[in-house]
Amino acid sequence: MRKYAIKQISVFLENKPGRLARLAEAIIDADVNILALNIAEAGDFGIVRMLVNNPKTAYEELQKKGFTVSSIDVIGIKIKNEPGVLHKIAKVLGDANINIDYAYAYSGNSDAYLILRVSN
């Protein structure tokens, strides 16, 4: 298991048709590739969280195009793509009294990647 500090781009977005397409177009204009994406819905708005290949460029382009954007550090953990791995990680963090604010994951072939935002 390997841990990485990763910059995540978060965008506050209206929950309306076409808004995500507008965001994606801004990413294209910046010549940035989205590596992972998570959308959390909150009524009339949502938060789009992205890992991209060039966070600084993405942040600047989104800000220039009028998006409400932030950049924060998250923890990326390369894990085996097999049953029980999430339990092991959650247990270690819980036993250490570390709270997980949110998490999302994506997988490749034999490996998976768990992205965590912890509050402490």
Image: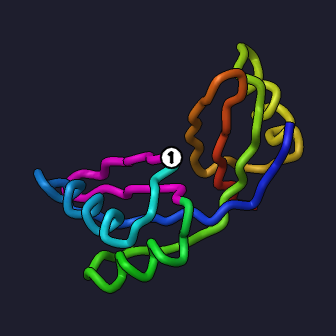
The quarter of the rendered structure image containing the C terminus is bottom right
Residue at x-position 45% and y-position 72%: 58
Q: Position of residue 3 (x, y in %)?
A: 82, 49
The residue most toward the front is 31
The vertical placement of 77 against 5, above or below, is above
Amino acid at dot 1: Ala
Residue at x-position 66% and y-position 59%: 74
The quarter of the rendered structure image containing the N terminus is top right
For disc 1, the neighbor class at 10 Å (few under 14, some 14 to 19, many from 20) is: some
Residue 49 painted magenta: yes
The residue to which callout 1 is attached is 36
Query: What is the magenta segment's predominant secondary structure?
Result: strand
The magenta region covers 36-52
Residue at x-position 77% and y-position 32%: 79
Residue 68 painted magenta: no
Q: Position of residue 89 (x, y in %)?
A: 79, 33
Residue at x-position 54% and y-position 56%: 51
Q: Position of residue 56 (x, y in %)?
A: 54, 77
Q: Indicate left or right for 18 with 79 as reference.
A: left
- Quadrant of the rendered image containing residue 119: bottom right
